[in-house]
Image (cartoon, coloured by chain):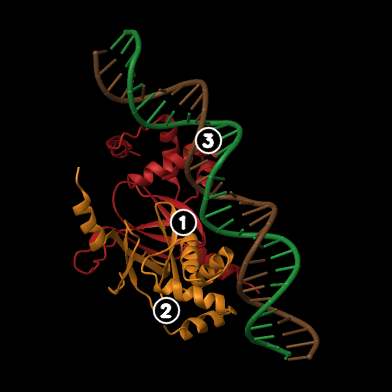
Chain colours: A red, B orange, C brown, D green
Amino acid sequence: MDKSPIKELLNEQKFRLTSERESLLDVFSRSSSMVTPAQLYELAQQHDIRIGLTTVYRLLEVLTKIGVATPFLVDGTIYYAYCGCNHHHHFVCLSCHRVTDLHNSCPSFHVPENFDVIAHRSDAYGTCPDCRKASEVGCNP
Amino acid sequence: MDKSPIKELLNEQKFRLTSERESLLDVFSRSSSMVTPAQLYELAQQHDIRIGLTTVYRLLEVLTKIGVATPFLVDGTIYYAYCGCNHHHHFVCLSCHRVTDLHNSCPSFHVPENFDVIAHRSDAYGTCPDCRKASEVGCNP
DNA sequence: AAAATATAGAAAATGGTTTTCTATTATTGA
DNA sequence: TCAATAATAGAAAACCATTTTCTATATTTT
């Protein structure tokens, strides 16, 4: 993956792309599901990346600030999805938490006078093909 | 406000609308901003409603389950907005957390084959007229 | 009315997240 | 290049929102 655009975004706000963050970012960007900080920490360890949990929290924080990560609240727990550098919407599987990027056109919000829209979220939730199949097969009472 | 549709929704899942919940629901539904559990607890106390913080958490939990409350994650903290019984979208002021209901048509999500959309969220974030004015006036360096 | 079920609330426990502090590492600037 | 400044890493402790326990009370159901 090309990290230079992310590096630029980071630099704009005086954030540094250290080797720890770079490896962690690699793991994060390759994950097809959204992950909790603890899960990302776990993932990193499986890839022999030795970093502290604190570092994971801090990376997710800066990535969220620059828009490369997006936090999701599902059933009370906070997950982060890797979003790269361009705006899009998401389909989130409520069963396996896999995230599929959607490239629909953005909805138009008709807000009252003098309201200033500076961001929006527009995401779909449901069941992905795999989980759908699994639930159909496994449902044997 | 008419609580009977909410009461029905609660009953469907064997939840009870006790007097504590009823008063708390009144306060919650009249709040124009989204609130944290602690803030709702605070609000209740100001209205001389003596309930425990635990009860606030539990009410928000059941209201979320029946779709009458919606949790929002803003800057790492979880807020709940009162949503009543009909689906709509939201404008959230990032400054004062006031919530304005939007009644736009729902966006159409074009998902790949065999993806099953069962819910969606589509919300706008920005600055409300009051906060916009405040920031313009108060910005005196 | 009696039995079963759900709720209220205080107190304690839990656990995700943040803070603190020190040692490194990277960037700036003389 | 060599300081000086600023940002980061990481372990440990602190913090605090949320959940769990447990007992008493209230509401449904039978």
Pick the front one: A93 or D17 = D17
Pick the front one: D19 or A84 = D19
- Residue corresponding to mark 3: A52
Question: Helix or strand or loop: what does disc 2 sit on?
Answer: loop
Residue A112 screen position, x and y as percent:
22, 69
- Residue corresponding to mark 1: A98
- Residue corresponding to mark 2: B85
Q: Quadrant location of the N terminus of chain A?
A: top left
The chain letter under disc 1 is: A
Q: Residues within 10 Å of mark 2 (few under 14, many from 20)?
A: few
Hey, which quadrant is residue B81 in on the image?
Answer: bottom left
Question: Helix or strand or loop: what does disc 3 sit on?
Answer: loop
Q: Residues within 10 Å of mark 3 (few under 14, many from 20)?
A: few
Q: Amino acid at mark 3?
A: Gly
Determine if residue B68 is in view: no
Task: Establish whether labels 2 and 1 are both on one chain.
Answer: no
Residue A98 screen position, x and y as percent:
46, 56
Count of marks overlaid on the render:
3
Task: Establish whether labels 3 and 1 are both on one chain.
Answer: yes
Residue B85 screen position, x and y as percent:
42, 79
